[in-house]
Amino acid sequence: MDDVRLIDLGLCSYTQSQTLYHALADTMRPTDPNTLILCRPRRPYVCIGRHQELGREVDEAACRRLGLPILRREVGGGAVYLDRNQVFFQLVWRPREVPARIHDAFEHFARAPVDCYRQLGVSGAHFAPVNDLQVDGRKIGGLGAATIGHRFVFVGSIILDFDARAAASVLRIADEKMRDKVAGAIDTYVSSLRKELGHPVPPRTVRRQLVASFEQTLGARLVPGRPDARELAGYRRWVPRMRSRAWVDEVGLGGRPRKPLRITGQVYLGHGDHKAPGGLVRVTLVVAGDTVVDSLVSGDFYAIGDAPAQMEAALLGPASPEGLAQRVAAVWSRLEAPGVAPDDVVHAATEALRTAIGALPGEGAPAPAGRRGRGPW
């Protein structure tokens, strides 16, 4: 394999920690080298996944109170609290050198962080599909992947130490008693080098071992480098987008153009959630008459390319569970969403449809004028 360019940012701004790999992937040419970025943000911040609705996942008031910025990434997954106690690795790779199946790609690139943990003393570290690093049932790292521009991106972290209370404080949770329970669960099931080994490990030691592990598992030499002028220009173009409110709010029915809808007795909004092996799938449907006229697929799952947009398009049409299932099945062979099956989307969509139709009059009552029927519920 060709040499891999290593860009070690050390401590960097929170914006740079998320933006540089987006910019490199978007601007790199086919002949440019595969690249590994290592970094730690100077200040803590919150980052939401590509397909998440901000208002449903993050307590914005708490973030303002704590002075925590919020960013959205192009990579899927859930809302996460990030700080300098995590060493982040971000691979920007030529697609032709990535295993064809996304599950195989996760397993392939996860070998280095698994080896890093083991070399540092966490002997039970292993890759746990779909996208976790675990030891004895505890999570010690999350992984993510996406296609940005013409490059495959794979990201993850080595957790030096973890503040469960801080992580729980930024999530949208109904009451403080439940927040305490969530913090306790995070503390129990999310681990770190410090917790596993009983002592802190210096970031420099982790970075050195991570580089050695990537060289070993990739069979390539990592050569220190830096972004060139063209890539830095791309970075400057990406910064305003990553920090814009419009981008952070981008996922949501209200944020996308659609046919004008007048909310009347014939137009309903329904929501449905379903927990798939690959993460939470959330579907929102706008049902007008007997037709799904708008849809949103969100959640903390991973999807490659425009898979969520294709799911949303497939959900439009006659408002019946059978129709939803047929339309989703028809497009599924073109989609990549590890750990998510067509039935997972259909389950959430059917619940959203049930919620919408449930807003209609009860059995035996006349249906609103212009509506042909209530469907099976």
Image (spheres, rainbow, N blue to C red):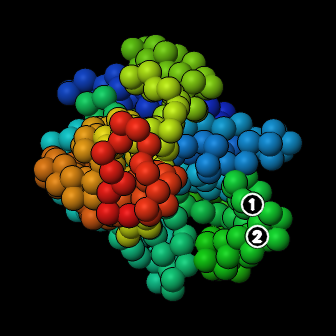
Q: What residue is shown at x 35% (from left), y 26% (from top)?
A: 26
Q: Considering only vertical position in the picture, is 377 above or below 299?
A: below
Residue type, numbered disc 1 = Ala
Mark 1 = which residue?
A: 174
Residue 375: percent from the left, percent from the top?
Answer: 32, 57
Mark 2 = which residue?
A: 178
Q: Considering only vertical position in the picture, is 132 above or below 171?
A: below
Residue type, numbered disc 2 = Met
Q: Are marks 1 and 2 in contact (CB under 8 Å)?
A: yes
Instruction: Give the camera-side residue of 267 and 364.
Output: 364
Position of 12 compared to 295: left or right? right
Q: Which quadrant holds residue 245?
A: top right
Q: Which mark is residue 191?
A: none
Q: What residue is shown at x 71% (from left), y 70% (from top)?
A: 182
Position of 171 compared to 376: left or right? right
Q: Quadrant of the C terminus?
A: bottom left
Q: CA distance from mark 1 to mark 2?
A: 7 Å
Number of numbered markers: 2
Residue 6: percent from the left, percent from the top?
Answer: 42, 40
Indicate the secondary structure of the residue bearing disc 2. helix
